[in-house]
Image: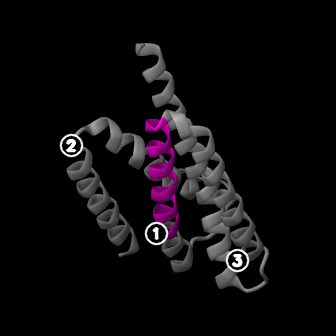
């Protein structure tokens, strides 16, 4: 059921971003890292042989929300070239704050806190890296046109 809820959340994000941008390129640039990060997080758990619980799956919704923030901020920063460097620094500070707080939860002895911390920690690492890479790709394409 949680996968269905997560699918609905992603579909709502897809529709709302589609209505905002009205082009597929920005929507894919923003949502692509989120969808890939969720898949890579699940793959990471499979490789580490971590049994999934409801708390892992609920945490993936948090990864989607945090990932949306990172993707939107990187994308908006890339569009405003004059402040891109400062914009990226702000996102990086937020990223390290998230890594720190969920990293502490991931080493907890309580299985609930451990599941939430580990899921968000792995997911945020994936989504931050993928959002950063997709934005760099957009910037390189824009600079190569001119």
Task: Tell which circle, 3 or 2, labels the residue nearer the N-terminal end.
Answer: 2
Marks 1 and 2: which is nearer the front?
Answer: 2
* The furthest residue to the front: 82
Left or right: 20 as drawn, with respect to 95: left
Count neighbours of disc 2 (C-alpha within 10 A) and say few if under 14, some if 14 to 19, many if 20 or more: few
Q: Are marks 1 and 2 in contact (CB under 8 Å)?
A: no
Distance CA(mark 3)–CA(mark 2): 40 Å
**Residue stretch in magenta:** 62-80
- Residue 109 at what x, y percent from top left? 79, 83
**Dot 2 lies on which element?**
loop
> Which one is earlier in the sequence, the residue at label 3 or at label 1?
1
Q: Mark 2 points at which residue?
A: 22
Residue at image point 62% right, 75% down: 116
Q: Do the residues labelled 3 and 1 touch (CB within 8 Å)?
A: no
Q: Residue at x 33, y 66 (%)?
A: 9
Is 124 displayed left or right of 145 in the figure? Answer: right
Secondary element type, mark 1: helix
Q: Tell me the crowding category of disc 1: few under 14, some 14 to 19, or many 20 or more residues within 10 angstroms, Cα based.
A: many
Q: Verify whether residue 49 appears in magenta.
A: no
**Which is more toward the observer, 71 or 123?**
71
Q: Which quarter of the rendering shows the N terminus?
A: bottom left
Please tell me which residue lies in front, 135 or 52: 135
- Mark 1 to mark 2 CA distance (whole Å): 25 Å
Read off the residue under disc 3.
114
Cα separation between marks 3 and 1 = 16 Å
Q: Where is residue 127 in the image (x, y as percent from the top left)?
A: 55, 51
Q: Looking at the image, is mark 3 or mark 2 nearer the viewer?
A: 2
At 56% across and 39% down in the image, what residue appears? 84
**Disc 1 designates what residue?**
61
Left or right, 69 with reference to 100:
left
* Number of residues whose C-alpha sits closer than 10 Å to that of mark 3, classed few (under 14), some (14–19) or many (20 or more): many
């Amino acid at each position: 059921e949680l996968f269905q809820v997560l699918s609905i959340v992603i579909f709502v994000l897809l529709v709302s971003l589609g209505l905002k941008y009205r082009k597929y390129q920005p929507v894919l640039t923003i949502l692509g890292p989120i969808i890939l990060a969720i898949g890579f997080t699940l793959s990471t758990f499979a490789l580490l042989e971590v049994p999934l619980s409801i708390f892992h799956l609920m945490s993936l919704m948090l990864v989607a929300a945090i990932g949306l923030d990172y993707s939107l901020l990187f994308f908006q920063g890339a569009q405003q070239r004059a402040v891109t460097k400062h914009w990226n620094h702000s996102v990086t500070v937020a990223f390290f704050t998230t890594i720190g707080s969920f990293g502490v939860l991931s080493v907890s002895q309580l299985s609930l806190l451990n599941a939430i911390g580990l899921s968000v920690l792995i997911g945020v690492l994936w989504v931050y890296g993928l959002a950063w890479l997709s934005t760099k790709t957009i910037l390189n394409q824009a600079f190569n046109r001119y």
